[in-house]
Amino acid sequence: MNVPAARVTINDVAARAGVSKGAVSMAFNNRPGVSQATRKRIFEVAQELGWAPHQTARSLSGRRSGIVGLALCRPARVLGLEPFYMEFISGIEDVLSERSCSLLLRLVRDLEEEVTLYEEWWRSRTVGGAILVDFHHDDPRVGPLRALGMPAVAVGHPSLTGGFPSVWTDDASAAAEAVRYLAALGHRRIARVGGPAGLGHSGIRAAAFEATMAELGLDGRLQMSTGFVGEEGARATRSLLLGPDRPTAVVYDNDIMAVAGAAVAAEMGLSVPDDVSLLAWDDSQLCRLTHPALSAMSHDVHQFGEEVARSLFGVIEGTYRGDHQVPTPALTPRGSTGPPRRT
């Protein structure tokens, strides 16, 4: 007769790691009071013994399960092509994996469906908190989600996020730097291909673009697209380059649209950067795969995701230190920008 092996318990982990049962609990719940070295040793012992906290027990003790929610209002086809969110989510996942937590990602059709989804998740104890993204001006999600009382971190400038704890990049300063750089190269007719007009961060960039162009006395054209996909970036670029007094430089709101814009320039027989300079935003691997390689407003999107996830755990655990800005996107010049051709 086979005797089943005894079930490993938290006491076994504590004994093997040479710590108290409370220290094991604090380590797995990411509570203060345990050093990083001790936390690492506890995790290693737990993995060696094959032990993990019982999620049901944690829920019954008043804690929700170790799941973070993220809803994105965009088609699956678009998300699969967007480097920003792939990098952003990978940064979130790195932090979640350190805490044996999971990300619950759902795509929704509109903001109303997003609110309903978060309400269902919170009331059913499915998630312990959420990451809120893509804020609009006067965002309709703010009121109902604040009333819900769900721990959440907003990705966006505090002027957009309605009092939620916020983590953001300084899009206005980055947009101004892009314009000043192109102006220093000699460009006087500069266009911008942006995201949806109602999207908060795109609006901040647009306002900074227009203000800097006016300050420098330049001819700026604002070409708003209806999304961040390549087809729309191509359509907007084609419209700009076929118009009268075509711009000599174009700034894009993401990498996909910039790559599509480079294809349109080639299709029209224009040389990049002699006939038109192109400047992308985010600086994913796509920027280095084009010829010439795309100049970009570059920032560490993976690190951005990590910082957002850490901030959410701070909110959940009561250790959040307040709204903060991550490093501002900085110019990375490559072969797609240069002085305009003299005629």
Image (cartoon, rainbow, N blue to C red):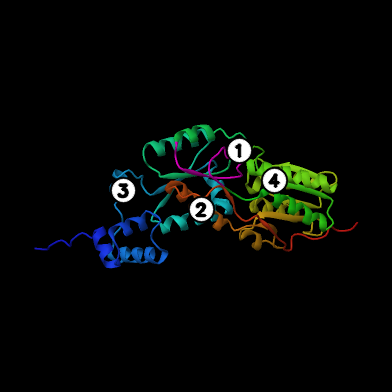
Under mark 3, the amino acid is Arg
Separation of residues labelled 1 and 3 (CA atoms): 36 Å
Q: Which amino acid does label 2 sit on?
A: Ile
What amino acid type is highlighted by mark number 1? His
3D distance between C-alphas at marks 2 and 3 = 26 Å
Name the residue carrying label 2: 89
Q: Can residue 307 be seen in this view?
A: yes
Observer-nearest of 72 and 268: 72
State the SS at label 1. loop
Amino acid at pointer 4: Arg
* Label 4: which secondary element: helix
List x then y, in percent, for residue 207: 73, 42
Give the magenta-colored segment's residue range.
149-166
Residue under numbered circle 4: 205
Of the numbered discs 4 and 2, the one sitting upstream in the chain is 2
Q: Distance between the residues labelled 4 and 1?
A: 13 Å
Q: Nearer the viewer, mark 2 or mark 3?
A: 3
As measured in the structure, the alpha-carbon distance from the residue carrying label 4 to the one carrying label 2 is: 23 Å
Asked if the magenta segment contains residue 128, the reply would be no
Q: Distance of mark 2 from mark 1, alpha carbons?
A: 21 Å
Q: Residue furthest right?
A: 343
- Left or right: residue 248 versus residue 113 is right
Quarter of the picture containing the N terminus is: bottom left
User: Sequence-wise, which precedes: disc 1 or disc 3?
Assistant: 3
| Secondary structure under the numbered disc 3 in the rendered image | helix
With 323 as the anchor, is 12 left or right in this view?
left
Q: Name the residue under label 1.
A: 136
